[in-house]
């Protein structure tokens, strides 16, 4: 089986930049016909659905982790969806019907808090952009709420879980009760009150 060319994880590239979010609120998006939905895919269909949506010009975000694997004595970088079974789409009603008709989707989950999901996805994107080793968290453990004080993630809030050799800073996507973690030095974290 040939190795397929990688599909973009984010389409269009500006998808997570609109609307611009602030601590005290957000500016309205110019595209009021579109809203966020979470596509719950059939098993192992996330990347195939992303390729199909890309070809049709439908906006989506598929956060992926990069892993190095050996294929026929060659080392290649594989992209594995972080949240298996989920792909985030920002679609119109007509596009929603097209997504459902792909036969790659088990269902579409309506997002009631559009701003909160967008903020979660922006935080996931920022962490992935670091290029640091991450771990997908399937169940978020209750823990201390913290804010990163120093470094490229400064100002970001999340939850911390003690780990061997440091602290895992967890960035969550509350809507699907999943997240990812990155190992951080405890000195860069400040406890929220």
Image (spheres, helix red, strand yellow):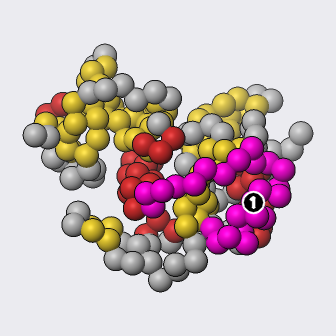
- Residue 129 in view (yes/no): no
Range covered by the magenta-colored residues: 91-114
Q: Is residue 97 left or right of residue 88?
A: right
Q: Seen from this angle, which residue lies furthest bottom?
A: 30
Q: How many marks?
A: 1
Q: Residue furthest top?
A: 164
Q: Nearer the viewer, residue 175 or 165?
A: 175
**Image point (86%, 44%), residue name:** 2
Location of the C terminus by quadrant is top left
Is residue 71 highlighted in magenta? Answer: no
Relative to 79, does residue 113 appear above or below in the rendering? below
111 and 149: which is toward the camera: 111
Residue at 84% across, 50% down = 103
Q: Can residue 22 be seen in this view?
A: yes
Residue ID at (68%, 70%) = 93
CA neighbours of label 1 inside 10 A, class few (<14), some (14 to 19), many (20+): many
* Image location of residue 189, percent across then percent down: 17, 38
Residue 138 relative to residue 46: left or right: left
- Quarter of the image holding residue 94? bottom right
Where is mark 1, residue-wise? Answer: 99
x and y percentages locating residue 177 in the rendered image: 47, 36
Lateral position of residue 133 relative to residue 33, left or right: left
């Amino acid at each position: 089986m040939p190795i397929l060319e990688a599909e973009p994880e984010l389409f269009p590239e500006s998808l997570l930049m609109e609307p611009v979010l602030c601590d005290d609120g957000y500016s309205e998006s110019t595209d009021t016909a579109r809203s966020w939905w979470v596509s719950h895919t059939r098993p192992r269909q996330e990347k195939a659905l992303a390729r199909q949506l890309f070809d049709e010009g439908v906006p989506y975000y598929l956060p992926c982790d990069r892993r190095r694997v050996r294929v026929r004595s060659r080392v290649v970088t594989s992209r594995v969806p972080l949240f298996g079974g989920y792909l985030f789409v920002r679609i119109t009603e007509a596009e929603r019907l097209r997504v459902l008709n792909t036969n790659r989707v088990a269902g579409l989950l309506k997002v009631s808090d559009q701003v909160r999901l967008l903020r979660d996805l922006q935080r996931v994107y920022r962490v992935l952009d670091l290029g640091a080793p991450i771990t997908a968290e399937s169940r978020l453990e209750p823990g201390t709420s913290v804010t990163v004080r120093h470094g490229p993630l400064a100002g970001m809030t999340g939850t911390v879980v003690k780990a061997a050799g440091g602290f895992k800073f967890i960035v969550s996507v509350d809507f699907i009760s999943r997240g990812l973690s990155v190992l951080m030095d405890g000195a860069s974290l400040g406890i929220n009150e």
